[in-house]
Image (spheres, grey):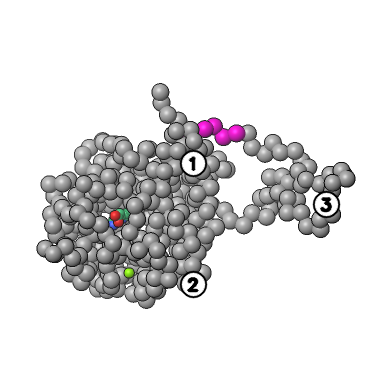
Amino acid sequence: MAIKFGRPIEARDTAPSFTSGTDASPAALHLTTRMRRNRKSEWARRLVRENVLTTDDLIWPLFAADGDNRREAVASMPGVERLSVDQCVRDAERAAKLDIPCIALFPYTDPALRDPQGSEALNADNLVCRTVRAVKKEFPDLGVLCDVALDPFTSHGHDGLLRDDGVIMNDETVAVLARQALVQAEAGCDVIAPSDMMDGRIGAIRDALDAAGFGDVQIMAYAAKYASAFYGPFRDAVGSAKALTGDKRTYQMDPANSDEALREVELDIAEGADMVMVKPGLPYLDILRRVKDTFAMPTFAYQVSGEYAMLMAAANNGWLDGERAMMESLLAFKRAGADGVLTYFAPRAAEKLRTRG
Ligand SMILES: NCc1[nH]cc(CCC(=O)O)c1CC(=O)O
Ligand SMILES: [Mg+2]
């Protein structure tokens, strides 16, 4: 039996016109303020609504893969596929038609091309660069964001260079990341998004971009990125799950920390980040709010693969109304102060917003 996405939405706005709970019974309370008055009907709720989600808030992550005319399902992310370059262009077209401002590209690198240095990241004709060129050629007005980190390219699955004793080498990695960013900028990428959590990489990448004449290329720093269990399905999608030796706790943040996120963000801003990101999303809304309040920067949240997988699993089991849970989760980011959200729900949310959701 085919599994549908969630339950049908129940009829909305059928509430009676008088719902503030007042009545003339002897039990009537003499309340000056009744909060329910402003909720009595849809027009009244619209009038006092504090936050809205629009398509302008959405960044849609896509997974690129080799091949031609291929779309391959990612088992742990129902509804998400790895796309050959031509199919990435088709999804870019869908994004453009839905008025989604920006897509984010992640490559599934052929395992044969992965090595300990992640050399394929520096190949100007690698999968991600070919995808950027193909997309920008057809849709020059669609924003394209590229992740900077070595994990889709390394045989050990780490974001940086791994020394024999297991240490991830910071400064040596930063030098490679700056070159990776240049290769992506040359391909036409609009936003460089370093997700590696090495120290000092934002400054090094900014310098490299400026020196090469890419002064207009923006940097969205994965500034407060936690060592999270919620990245599991993403690692399936880019094929780094099986490769990964150990974990990423020497460079990604400890989920127990909050003040530390502010120091991370502060450094990335000082080094030249144009936009900052908190990741994962829903479990870290407290961090998002602190970052936004403290720095007043363009601030983004990444609703990561595991969050998407949780919602989809429950929806596909009929345990949640998938559409409503999706929209509620995205609105939560706005309420917490996000200027935008990277989300695998982007096309579905945009479709819903178009029909006024
Ligand atoms: N550095 C790579 C990267 N870029 C984005 C994600 C996760 C995105 C998601 O889970 O949706 C990861 C995974 C990781 O750090 O292991
Ligand atoms: Mg940092």
Q: Measuring from the top left, give residue 210's x and y in whole percent.
A: 28, 72
Q: Measuring from the top left, give residue 51's x and y in whole percent.
A: 58, 56
Tell me the residue that label 2 is attached to. 294
Q: Does 8 sit left or right of 257 as displayed?
A: right
**Amino acid on which disc 2 is placed:** Thr
**Amino acid on which disc 1 is placed:** Glu
> With respect to residue 160, does 81 lie above or below?
above
- The first of marks 3 and 2 along the sequence is 3
Q: Is residue 64 visible?
A: no
Label 1: which secondary element? helix
Question: How many neighbours does mark 2 have within 10 angstroms: few (below 14), some (14-19), or many (20 or more)?
Answer: few
Tell me the residue that label 3 is attached to. 29
Whether the residue carrying mark 2 lies under 8 Å from ligand 2 is answered with no
Q: CA distance from mark 3 to mark 2?
A: 42 Å
**Amino acid on which disc 3 is placed:** Leu
Residue 351's tag is 1
Residue extent of the magenta highlight: 5-10
Judging depth in this view, the residue of 8 and 97 nearest the camera is 8
Judging depth in this view, the residue of 259 and 86 nearest the camera is 259
Tags 3 and 1 touching, CB below 8 Å: no
Judging depth in this view, the residue of 189 and 30 nearest the camera is 30
> With respect to residue 6, does 96 lie above or below?
below
Judging depth in this view, the residue of 180 and 301 nearest the camera is 301
